[in-house]
Amino acid sequence: DGRREMSRRGFFLGPTILDHVTPRMAVGREEIFGPVLSIARAATLDDAIAHANASSLGNMATIFTQSGRAGREFRERVEAGMTGINVPIAQPFAFFPFSGWKGSFFGDLHVHGTDGIDFYTRKKVVVTRW
């Protein structure tokens, strides 16, 4: 498959594309991090949104479409903290929040963006009158 052999210590996987992923597959129900792209195909926009929203996780969802209407509807209805339209990975720059939803989110604040700044900031309110 063209991959270089990895270290035998640990668990490593080279870049991998998994196509025709369904919710019946473990990879269709679990979060996979690393150089792995899971492709779930849907016959209709409603099917695609229902597939994404049926998951207990909500880190990222991406749709490829030529329809602006479909992209906007996906953006508004999908339950994912990072949503992409016609991009392979909806990973923003560091100043945007890494904002997983549902079971993909841990803690009180998101890692990047203003939440990350808030975490390391001690705020103070001063009310004065002279």
Image (spheres, rainbow, N blue to C red):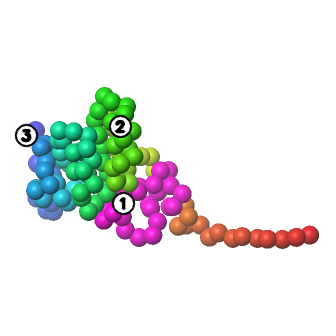
Three-letter amino acid code at the position of disc 3: Asp
> Would you name the residue on which mark 1 appears?
101
Disc 3 or 2, which lies upstream in sequence? 3
SS label for mark 1: strand
The quadrant in which residue 40 appears is top left
Crowd class of label 2 (few under 14; some 14 to 19; many from 20; radius 10 Å): some
| Mark 3–mark 2 CB contact (< 8 Å) | no
Quadrant in the picture for the C terminus: bottom right
In 3D space, how far apart are the residues under numbered discs 3 and 2 (Cα atoms)?
Answer: 34 Å
Labels 1, 2: front one? 2
Give the Cα separation between the discs numbered 1 and 3. 34 Å
Q: Is residue 123 left or right of residue 109?
A: right
The mark that comes first in sequence, 1 or 3, is: 3
Q: Please identify the quadrant where the N terminus is shown.
A: top left
Q: Position of residue 112 (x, y in %)?
A: 46, 57
- Secondary element at image label 3: loop
Asked whether the residues under the numbered discs 1 and 2 touch, taking CB atoms below 8 Å apart as contact, a structural biologist would say: no
Name the amino acid type tagged 1. Trp
The residue under label 2 is 71
Q: Main secondary structure of the magenta part?
A: loop
Position in image of residue 115 (x %, y %): 51, 61
User: How many tags in the picture?
Assistant: 3
Residue with the mark numbered 3 = 1
The magenta stretch spans residue 48: no
Q: Residue at x 46, y 66 (%)?
A: 109
x%, y% of residue 19? 13, 42
Q: Is residue 35 left or right of residue 123?
A: left
Please, what secondary structure does the residue beneath circle 2 have?
Answer: helix
Choose between 42 and 101: the one closer to the eye.
42
Magenta residues span 95-116
3 vs 2, front mark = 2
